[in-house]
Image: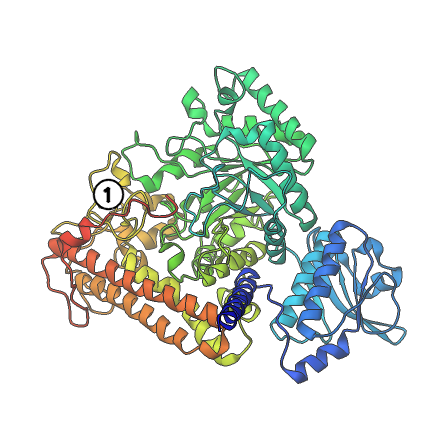
């Protein structure tokens, strides 16, 4: 009996470990699941079109491409796919860059000038009565991108008959900004510790580094900033550069360059100098020598990302210099090696009593056209700080002579961390489609950052990473979609977020239409739900301070005015909202006249931005006939109701999703529902003090007092 119990115990442990491994694979594999196709008719069609792979390249990148193609096809089609180096037989997939293609195949492919160096062509051709699918490009990295695109077609049940695809990225730099510290903590990270195990590098290469590179390459991300913008100069010492070099060697075959954050005071902290003045010759030479040292190790090093004179970080203004002086000095250091400087425009000063939203524009726009050619100014999507909703940053319509780089936040610092389901590509698309009127109607933010308006050679889009060492990489299964969606929009800023959601769901979960439609609708609505239960009608930055977890509209005791939520909502007995119109701070004047006119007028300002630009009476009539107070309260309730609807939608998907991920999302949605109610109750109780009005019909009454919500403390909130 004892033996039997022991035997059963061992079996149960083995079954648990097996189920854990299965779960780990599902969660871990992101959108590269390559699940076996079960539709017999569809599989039959794929079988007929794919007999084998002919790989014509011999580089590390081309080997990765052929291995990925073989892995994906074998898993999805359930048959052995051979890789050969010679074209023999029929119905092979030929992969290789233009240089490896015969003149006969090149002629069938046609004009390679329709793509750039990272683009690809996928085409069905016929030569001497033999049919082939060719995946080709000018360079091997383009072939790799083409392979991932082709695999996505099969993952999403698309036809591979008569293919004729030519695609290329619209931006040069498509990059993740990791806010990772050298102690492996991650600022605003909600998915565990940093991926980079500095202690074990360079000798130990974690498989995660390779899978990270695969995932990024699959959506066209071609750069990674390894370190926090609140930089540590130690990363520039030989001890750490050796480790950075090891990561660069892993990422290079996947088309990914490494970048580092440069602490402006590094010449003092690790260089032994007495100053970091950018006009000092010794300082400039120190940076030139440091750049040469880095490029000797890492010939394709991308360059530096710099946060300077912002939130206490050192910068050129410490020495009476300006952003141009600092950026151009660093640009000169990396220019001989083809490097770039990404200079962040996120600046606001405690010494400036003006509207925080106006400060970046005021500091940078006067310098339009004065930065070196290898400097790109990195601008957040809105003028405050990654809020659930912000109007587009006015700088995007005001610096036609300067390359501007979009900075989105993929990690959900102000959107519920990794416990809330929020499909951010909807937010990204809203910003990218905004019209700046820089050169008249149709001058969208997307066209500003992809260089199509000004023919800017240096273009880019950055996303603050949501990736950690959690099993599923991002803390929430659906947060993977934000990494995926960022990559897709960085490749093409005009992609539709619904298309992205559809792709991701099919690649990650299932092609079943009964699953896709309701869950896609849920994803598309999820961002608006968060806006509704956190910051409706243009409210912003009313999160609790420091950790930004939960509501804190009452906070008013911090040393800097613009750190306090009361600074942003300005609620009083007369109304609520920040007056940025001509009667207030006149921030609307930073936009083009056509946009200014819309935002400045209370009657034409979009209601979604109303309290961003105007201080509005509690009795003001909204377009739906409700008073502002009633409308605000009903929006908070609508957000809560939307999360309840999300729960109901997800609960019906159990038969389409593996048990582990189904349960995981189910539990997280329950947390989100409770926290949505927390937001609603705390904010309405606080604002009700000023409105003096009852909650309208349809809004649930709070079950706790305002004092209770004010008393809540979160000393160990993650990511802080």
What is the quadrant of residue 484 in the picture?
bottom right
Front-most of residues 315 and 240: 240
What is the quadrant of residue 351 in the picture?
top left
- Left or right: where does residue 432 sit relative to residue 389? right
Q: Residues within 10 Å of mark 1 (few under 14, many from 20)?
A: many
Identity of the residue drawn at 33% across and 48% down: 717
The percent coordinates of residue 42 (x first, y second) are 66, 81
Identity of the residue drawn at 10% across and 61% down: 693
Q: How many marks?
A: 1
Q: What colour scheme was applied to this rendering of the protein?
A: rainbow
Instruction: Please indicate, yes or no, whether residue 551 appears anywhere in the rendered image.
Output: yes
Quadrant of the drawing holding the C terminus:
top left
Q: Residue furthest front?
A: 1
Q: Residue furthest bottom?
A: 41
Identity of the residue drawn at 16% across and 57% down: 685
Front-most of residues 634 and 682: 682
Image height of 104 relative to 242, above or below:
below
- Left or right: where does residue 591 sit relative to residue 532? right
Front-most of residues 577 and 31: 31
Image height of 54 relative to 613, above or below:
below
Q: Secondary structure at mark 1?
A: helix
Instruction: Please indicate, yes or no, whether residue 606 appears anywhere in the rendered image.
Output: no
Q: Which residue is mark 1?
A: 567
The percent coordinates of residue 576 (x first, y second) are 19, 52
The percent coordinates of residue 716 (x first, y second) are 32, 45
Front-most of residues 266 and 242: 242
- Left or right: where does residue 56 sit relative to residue 667? right
The percent coordinates of residue 667 (x first, y second) are 37, 66
């Amino acid at each position: 009996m004892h033996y039997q119990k022991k035997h059963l115990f061992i079996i149960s442990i083995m079954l648990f470990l097996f189920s854990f491994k299965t779960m780990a694979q599902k969660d871990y594999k992101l959108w590269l699941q390559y699940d076996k196709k079960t539709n017999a008719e569809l599989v039959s069609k794929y079988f007929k079109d794919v007999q084998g792979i002919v790989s014509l390249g011999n580089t590390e990148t081309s080997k990765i491409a052929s291995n990925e193609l073989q892995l994906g096809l074998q898993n999805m089609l359930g048959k052995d796919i051979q890789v050969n180096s010679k074209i023999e037989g029929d119905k092979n997939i030929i992969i290789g860059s233009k240089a490896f293609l015969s003149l006969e195949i090149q002629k069938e492919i046609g004009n390679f000038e329709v793509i750039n160096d990272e683009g690809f062509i996928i085409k069905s051709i016929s030569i001497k009565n033999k049919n082939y699918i060719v995946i080709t490009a000018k360079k091997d990295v383009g072939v790799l991108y083409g392979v991932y695109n082709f695999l996505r077609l099969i993952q999403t049940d698309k036809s591979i008959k008569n293919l004729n695809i030519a695609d290329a990225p619209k931006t040069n730099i498509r990059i993740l900004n990791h806010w990772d510290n050298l102690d492996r903590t991650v600022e605003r990270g909600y998915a565990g510790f940093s991926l980079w195990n500095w202690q074990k590098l360079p000798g130990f290469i974690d498989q995660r580094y390779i899978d990270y590179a695969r995932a990024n390459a699959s959506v066209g991300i071609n750069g990674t900033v390894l370190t926090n913008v609140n930089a540590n100069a130690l990363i520039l010492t030989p001890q750490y550069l050796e480790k950075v070099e090891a990561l660069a060697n892993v990422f290079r075959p996947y088309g990914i360059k490494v970048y580092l954050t440069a602490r402006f005071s590094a010449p003092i902290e690790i260089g032994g100098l007495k100053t970091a003045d950018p006009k000092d010759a010794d300082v400039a030479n120190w940076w030139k020598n440091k750049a040469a040292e880095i490029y000797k190790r890492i010939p394709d090093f991308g360059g530096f990302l710099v946060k300077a004179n912002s939130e206490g970080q050192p910068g050129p203004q410490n020495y009476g210099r300006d952003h141009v002086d600092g950026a151009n000095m660093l640009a000169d250091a990396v220019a001989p090696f083809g490097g770039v400087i990404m200079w962040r425009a996120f600046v606001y000063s405690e010494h400036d009593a003006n509207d925080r939203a106006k400060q970046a524009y005021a500091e940078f726009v006067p310098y339009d056209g004065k930065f070196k050619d290898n400097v790109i100014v990195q601008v957040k999507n809105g003028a405050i700080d990654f809020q659930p909703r912000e109007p587009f940053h006015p700088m995007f319509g005001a610096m036609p002579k300067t390359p501007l780089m979009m900075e989105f936040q993929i990690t959900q610092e102000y959107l519920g961390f990794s416990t809330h389901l929020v499909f951010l590509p909807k937010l990204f698309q809203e910003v990218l489609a905004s019209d700046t009127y820089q050169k008249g109607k149709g001058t969208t933010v997307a066209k500003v950052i992809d260089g199509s308006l000004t023919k800017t050679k240096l273009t880019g889009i950055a996303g603050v990473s949501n990736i950690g060492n959690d099993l599923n990489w991002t803390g929430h299964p659906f947060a993977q979609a934000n990494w995926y969606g960022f990559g897709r929009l960085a490749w093409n800023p005009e992609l539709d977020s619904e298309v992205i959601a559809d792709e991701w769901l099919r690649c990650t979960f299932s092609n079943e239409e009964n699953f896709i439609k309701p869950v896609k609708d849920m994803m598309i609505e999820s961002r608006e739900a968060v806006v509704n239960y956190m910051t409706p009608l243009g409210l912003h930055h009313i999160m609790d301070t420091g950790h930004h977890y939960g509501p804190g509209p009452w906070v008013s005791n911090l040393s800097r005015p613009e750190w306090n939520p009361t600074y942003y909502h300005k609620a009083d007995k007369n109304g609520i909202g920040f007056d940025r119109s001509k009667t207030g701070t006149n921030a609307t004047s930073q936009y083009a006249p056509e946009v200014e006119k819309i935002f400045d007028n209370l009657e034409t300002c979009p209601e979604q931005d109303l309290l961003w630009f105007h201080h509005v009476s509690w009795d003001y009539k909204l377009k739906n006939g409700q008073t502002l107070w009633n409308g605000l309260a009903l929006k908070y309730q609508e957000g809560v109701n939307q999360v309840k609807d999300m729960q109901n939608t997800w609960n019906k998907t159990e038969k389409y999703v593996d048990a582990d991920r189904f349960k995981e999302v189910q539990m997280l949605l329950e947390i989100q529902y409770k926290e949505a109610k927390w937001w609603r109750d705390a904010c309405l109780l606080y604002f009700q003090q000023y409105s003096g009005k009852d909650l309208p019909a349809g809004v649930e009454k709070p079950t706790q007092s305002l004092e209770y919500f004010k008393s809540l403390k979160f000393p160990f909130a993650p990511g802080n």
